Amino acid sequence: MLTRVLGIKIVTLAFRLKVCHNNISMHEYPITQQIIKIAEKACIDANAGNVKKISLVVGDHCGFVGESIGMYFNAISKGTFCEGAEVEFERVEAKVRCPVCGKLFKRAPMSFACPECGTDGEPTDIGKEFYIKEIEVE
């Protein structure tokens, strides 16, 4: 049995704009529907029989909960090329950057202080990621 892996990235902002454009609220259900549509298209384009695995990168501050996506995926993928596929989540912890020493760090509860120099860290885009990293079909 031949297995193909397709790497697909979705820029978070572009994906969210598409969802907003279609007047769909930004929750896990419509996002999961879009993930299934993208995976099915990849399956058809690769002349494959089904989707075996979908790998998602989900940042802590992206606005989506991986466990909810997994729950919806199991429910709404029935009868599609994605039915029975494994959904794998790669979690990305949010980080802030110190404007003085440049250190990236995970902030402590109730504090933005840099562990190296004590200066308050500034927000970064690290932890806001949300994209399909890979779709494996067979």
Image (tube, grey):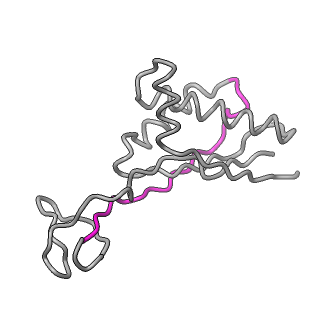
Q: On screen, 37 above or below 108?
A: above
Place of residue 33 in the rendered image (x, y in percent of width and height, measured from the top left): 57, 27
In this view, the residue in front, 77 or 105, is 105
In this view, the residue in front, 81 or 110, is 110
Place of residue 23 in the rendered image (x, y in percent of width and height, measured from the top left): 46, 17
Q: Is residue 124 left or right of residue 33?
A: left
Bounds of the magenta segment: 79-98
Place of residue 13 in the rendered image (x, y in percent of width and height, measured from the top left): 47, 41
Check if residue 128 falls in the magenta segment. no
The quadrant of the rendering that contains the C terminus is: top right
Check if residue 84 falls in the magenta segment. yes
Q: How many marks?
A: 0
Q: Is residue 28 left or right of residue 48?
A: left
Place of residue 85 in the rendered image (x, y in percent of width and height, measured from the top left): 66, 41
Q: Which residue in the rendered view is the most extreme toward the top?
A: 23
Residue under the image location 81 percent in, 52 percent down: 3
In this view, the residue in front, 67 or 125, is 125
Q: Is residue 72 left or right of residue 134?
A: left
Residue under the image location 73 percent in, 40 percent down: 51
Residue under the image location 22 percent in, 76 percent down: 100
Residue under the image location 82 percent in, 37 percent down: 45
In this view, the residue in front, 111 or 138, is 111
Q: Hey, which quadrant is residue 75 in on the image?
A: top right
